Amino acid sequence: MKISSDDIVKINQLYPSMREDAKCFLCEAADLNAFIFSGLRTYEEQTKLYSQGRTTTGDIVTNARPGQSWHNFGIAMDVVFKNSVGEWTWDDKEMWDELGKLGEKHRFHWGGRFRGFVDLPHFDRNYGFSLEELNEIYSEHEQLSDVWTAINNYGFKA
């Protein structure tokens, strides 16, 4: 199955060693009509999402402030279904378990297994780092490339 051009753009913004597995995951998830809704997020984008339902209109969609999300470091993606007319949908409860198992098959941590704030669309790899460690690395020069270099040099292979 072919991956959408939008997904290719989002995949290419992820940490390089995640990209091939993300492609394989999405190819297998194509029968579920699943696509990347969100991948890499800047701190500014994370601030907007965190504000939603708190200081701006809408439902709360995250408990992660800037720097508290794996998305901020290009090592997470949210994969969501599209309905028959191409609109994003989170409603099909039965398909989430199937999608989660596919993601885990490709060695991603699935947010459907999170305690507390269960995040069904979320798939990540932390490469043995904590968010605190990644923030410390990032804050030195505010360069994502610094984080990726640290993962290359010190992280474990997924």
Image (cartoon, rainbow, N blue to C red):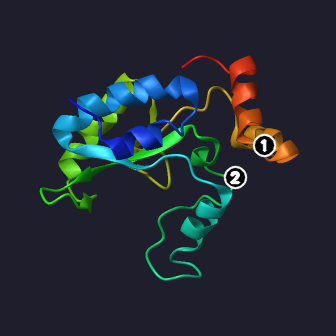
Give the class, few, some or many, for how many residues have Cα within 10 Å of label 1's Cα (few <14, many ≥20): many
Quadrant of the snapshot with the C terminus: top right
Report x, y in % for residue 8: 40, 38
Q: Which residue is mark 1?
A: 138
Verify CB contact (< 8 Å) between mark 2 and mark 1. yes
Residue type marked 2: Gly
List the residue tagged with mark 2.
67
Q: Please give left or right for residue 46 compared with residue 59 in the image.
A: right
Residue at left offset 24%, top offset 32%: 2
Amino acid type, callout 1: Tyr
- Residue 76, numbered label: none
Instruction: Classify mark 2: residues with Cα within 10 Å, few (<14), some (14-19) or many (20+).
Output: many
Left or right of residue 91, residue 143 in this image: right
Q: Position of residue 84 (x, y in %)?
A: 12, 56
Pointer 2 or 1: first along the chain? 2
Question: In this view, which residue lies farthest toward the left?
Answer: 84
Q: Can residue 107 be seen in this snapshot? A: no
- As measured in the structure, the alpha-carbon distance from the residue carrying label 2 to the one carrying label 1 is 9 Å
Q: Which label lies toward us, 2 or 1?
A: 1
Residue 116: x %, y % from top left: 50, 54
Which residue is depicted at the point 85% across and 44% down? 141
Decide if residue 8 is in sight here: yes
Of 156 and 16, the residue lying toward us: 16
Residue at point 54%, 40% (across, down):
13
Q: Tell me the SS state at disc 2.
A: loop
